[in-house]
Amino acid sequence: KIESSDRMDNCFDKLLKAIGHIRTKHQARTVKFKVNQLVHDLGKLHFGNLLSGFMLAFCVVLNELKDLNTQANLNRALYTAEFKSSLKTLCSDQGISILKAAAESAGLFIKPDTMPIRSLEEAEEEVKSLKRALKKKDEQLEAIIKANSFVNLANLPLMQLGDLDEDASFTTEDTGMVSPLALPVPLPQPVPPPSPSIVDLEPPYSLDFVF
């Protein structure tokens, strides 16, 4: 397993931070972008009378970065042992301090007021980010529509009836109409028994059988 401090992309991030680079929200995080940015920024640095060991390491790193920058894909790029050793020299505490001082002298820490021109890779990364956000919104909307497509009528609130108008008709403030289903239905009343006064216990006629 490669240690975190020995990973090439982590070393590139450390160098970029030392020379004043600040990654924007939609900026690519690929090794290809980092190499291109390092070639651009390291080429602006100028050093005074420095130790020959640091200058040799700096030249080795910059030259190999330029070669890497000509390759289309750096996901599985091969780095020479000399490059790795020189990169550690630049990423040391002393190396970072020297790079930061040179970057400040070159004005790399002074950011322009205008937005920098984005590369094609940055624009493609922003488009991908927007597509992912739109897809997530569509999935959320689809879930809401699906959840609301099955409504339990028993959980719906009862319609409130309006007041009686002069013509004894029901109205509501919202629609001016009342569904017949919302009108109160009277319960059936039991039929009262007949009054005893009208019950005749004897039949009003009799049958005589003649043989």
Image (cartoon, rainbow, N blue to C red):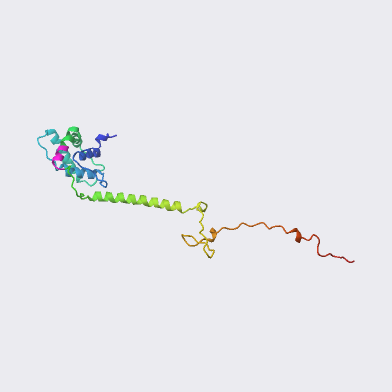
Residue 68 visible in the shown view: no
Foreground: 89 or 143?
143
Task: Magenta stretch: give its range.
Answer: 100-107
Q: In this view, does 114 lie above or below 97?
A: below
**In the drawing, does residue 104 fall left or right of residue 202?**
left
Residue 105 is one of the magenta-drawn residues: yes
Residue 126 is one of the magenta-drawn residues: no
What's the residue at 27%, 50% (across, down)?
124
Where residue 65 appears, as percent x and y from the top left, is 18, 42
Q: Is residue 202 above or below residue 55?
A: below
Residue 138 visible in the shown view: yes
Where residue 93 appears, as percent x and y from the top left, is 19, 33
Name the residue furthest left: 49
Per the picture, the main secondary structure of the magenta-coloured stretch is helix
Name the residue furthest right: 211
Q: Is residue 169 above or below residue 29?
A: below
Where residue 154 appears, as percent x and y from the top left, is 52, 52
Name the residue furthest bottom: 210
Quadrant of the image containing the N terminus? top left
Residue 16 image-quadrant placement: top left
**In the drawing, does residue 145 fall left or right of residue 53?**
right
Where residue 69 appears, as percent x and y from the top left, is 20, 45
Quadrant of the image containing the C terminus? bottom right
Residue 108 image-quadrant placement: top left
All told, the count of numbered labels is 0
Q: Is residue 66 above or below residue 178?
A: above
Foreground: 74 or 169?
169
